[in-house]
Image (cartoon, rainbow, N blue to C red):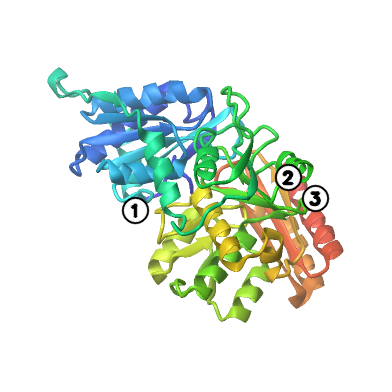
Amino acid sequence: MGERKYFGTDGIRGKVGESAINPEFVTKLGWAAGKVLAGQGTNKVLIGKDTRISGYMLESALEAGLSAAGINIGLLGPMPTPAIAYLTKTFRSEAGIVISASHNPYYDNGIKFFSADGFKLDDDIEIAIEAMMDEPMTCVASNKLGKATRINDAAGRYIEFCKGTFPSDLSLKGLKIVVDCAHGATYHIAPLVLSELGADVIEIGTSPNGLNINDRVGATSMKAIVDRVVESGADLGFALDGDGDRIMMVDNQGNVIDGDQILYIIARDALRSGRLNGGVVGTLMSNLGLENALSKLGVPFVRSKVGDRYVMELLQQKGWSIGGENSGHVLNLNLASTGDGIVAGLQVLTAMLRANMSLYELAGGFDKYPQTLVNVRFEDKGIDPLESEAVLQAKREAEATLGKRGRVLLRKSGTEPLIRVMVESDDELASTTQAEKIAAAVRNVAS
């Protein structure tokens, strides 16, 4: 299989103008992907993007490379990542490309691919694309160049898809919902989905200008939506991230409902209605409280490596449909082929209405263990902080202190130059203290 040079756990991502996210590289990437996909019989590829200003540049670069390889292109414009996966299937395209850095700041961007069935590309195809990047770029004859067309009804199609995942016998009438779209790709979609289903919608984060995506709004910055839910007396809030594949929620008391709680609510509702297929897949970061609560329900729970692609792989191996991460990536494979924030939120609303309970009441089903996460930025200087004896010693000491009442996890982010230090314990002070001790050791090595 070989080692991947460019593709991480979520495609290719970086700072615009540096490393791989520049016009020259992305043009070559479009060409290389086009050559590999054409060799498999591909004729048409869809391209969608979030609202970053760099999306225009990268879209044009991809378009040029794909055209040079003889691939036709359908341009979707600003669309959520899960929408591009869905539309790739419905338009019978052989692949879809997303230009987005998800929850990252506007100055980052990235490229990821979906296959014809709406799932992320297999590793062997990504490796083949990387191998093609080492070949000299060529161009097909003029009469074989790919053509680009704009798909104008993409948003409307996806809105109807989302509404179709909500039971037709239920309505959101009477519910006041705050929707935070992070000034990202769902700004013109999520409010309409909820309002067309009957909700009274209050919008924030729906005025993208190319530079404000994820800026103090959205699923990674919850203060704005918590404040608005409390101030407006709303029943709940939806907070999506920049590309719409993750969701965090807020109950009417102003409590943040994370991905673990959302998974629990969805799985319990599926169990009660006889729709649960097998068990639930979480990750190494999933709260121990989720595992314990599902165990009490008799629902199997297994952990994958961190990253929604690994959750997906384990779900497919087991033939299950529900899984996700505490960061808000939630997979409902019986409804969508990738993590979809809007669809996951609608499943929580379905559970609320069926149980005739508030989000606050539904989320009270399990007790979360206090979990401290510290991110330490590092530069690649040829030293792996996770292999440092000082860091390993700090980890061993923390594990000895916590015993069976907690756990420690150290890992590198798959999308940013960060070491993530997570400590979980039934004692919040112990969790925080041990996380800071380990983080200090990592900083000493990484600085």
Is disc 1 placed on a helix, strand or loop?
loop
Front residue (pair 66, 80): 80
- N-term-proximal mark, 2 vs 3: 2
Is mark 2 in CB contact (under 8 Å) with mark 1? no
Q: Which mark is residue 43?
A: none
The amino acid type found where label 2 is placed reads Val
Task: Please give the residue where the numbered disc 1 appears in the rendered image.
Answer: 1
Can residue 12 be seen in the rendering of this structure? yes
* Mark found first going from the N terminus, 1 or 3: 1
Q: Is residue 297 left or right of residue 162?
A: right
Instruction: Give the foreground label among 2 and 1.
Output: 2
**Distance CA(mark 2)–CA(mark 3):** 36 Å
Image quarter for residue 377? top right
The residue type indicated by label 3 comes to: Ala
Classify the position of the C terminus by image quarter: top right
The disc at residue 440 is 3
Would you name the residue on which mark 2 appears?
Answer: 229
Above or below, 418 relative to 16:
below
Percent position of residue 80, x then y: 47, 39
Where, by quadrant of the figure, is residue 28 drawn?
Answer: top left
Give the secondary structure at mark 3.
helix
Q: Give whichever of discs 2 and 1 has the lower sequence position.
A: 1
Residue furthest to the top? 142
Q: Quadrant of residue 403?
A: bottom right
The residue type indicated by label 1 comes to Met
The structure residue drawn at horizontal position 68% and vertical position 70%, both measured from the top left corner, is 365
x and y percentages locating residue 124 in the rendered image = 32, 51
Distance between mark 2 and mark 1 Cα atoms:
49 Å
Q: Residue at x 50, y 54 (%)?
A: 308
